[in-house]
Image: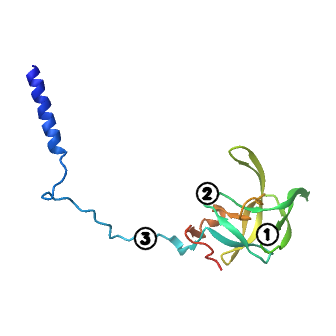
Amino acid sequence: MKRIIKMLGIANLSFFLCCCQSATKDQIVPAIVPSTQKTTVINPGNLEIIGAVEPIYFLPMKSAFEARIDTGATTSSIDADDIVEFERDGEKWVSFKITNRRSGETHTFERPIEKNLIIKRIDHQEHRIKVLMNVSFGGKDFAAEFTLAKRDKFEYQALIGRNILTGRAIVDTSLSHTFK
């Protein structure tokens, strides 16, 4: 019995060694062939291709704000100061000031409150007000929702989220300032 087990062990070892031999110069080794197919970007509707940072105008202001493009953000936001909620004709409104840090241009806005939000962060919750703003982005004027935020610690005063990007643009993060 021991002899049979020993012979089976030798047979298994021999088989294993035969299967695991490395290639020699006489053996054919397949070469790695690079793909000849080109990557095609699908752009339904010929949407604008924009970069990671683009200018946006908050109408009627004349100077552009540098905006960070963030496909992970649901709603866009803007750095606002002097935020004061009040009531007008039975509706909730808000007054706030936007100052362009680069140009110094300042404008005070009064807008109806679209919604009050709670933004959940890892270590805290943040109360934000959502308003409808008239903007110019990529040469097109339209109204879009923005949350009023304290972005003074951020490099960019405006953040453009999916609510503006969807159906308007495709983001290529290797680009920047595609809008003139």
Determine the CA span between mark 1 and mark 2.
25 Å
The residue at 77%/62% (across/down) is: 79
Q: Amino acid at mark 1?
A: Arg
Residue type, numbered disc 2: Gly
> Which quadrant of the structure image shows residue 17?
top left
Disc 1 target residue: 101
Other-residue count near label 1 (Cα within 10 Å), few / some / many at <14 / 14–19 / ≥20: few
Q: In front of the other: label 1 or label 2?
A: 1
The residue that appears at 82% across and 68% down in the rendered structure is 99
Q: Secondary structure at mark 2?
A: loop
The three-letter code of the residue at mark 3 reads Thr
Neighbour class for label 3 at 10 Å: few (<14), some, many (≥20)?
Answer: few
Q: Which residue is mark 2?
A: 72
Please give the label number shown on residue 39: none
Q: CA distance from mark 2 to mark 3?
A: 24 Å
Residue at 61% from the left image edge and 76% from the top image edge? 178
Work out which quarter of the rendered image holds the N terminus and state it. top left
Which quadrant of the figure has residue 90?
bottom right
**Mark 3 element type:** loop
Give the x, y percent position of residue 47.
Answer: 56, 73
**C-alpha distance separating marks 1 and 3:** 40 Å
Is disc 1 placed on a helix, strand or loop? loop
Farthest residue, direction top: 1
Earlier-in-chain disc, 1 versus 3: 3
The residue at the far bottom in this view is: 180
Establish if 18 lies above or below 150.
above
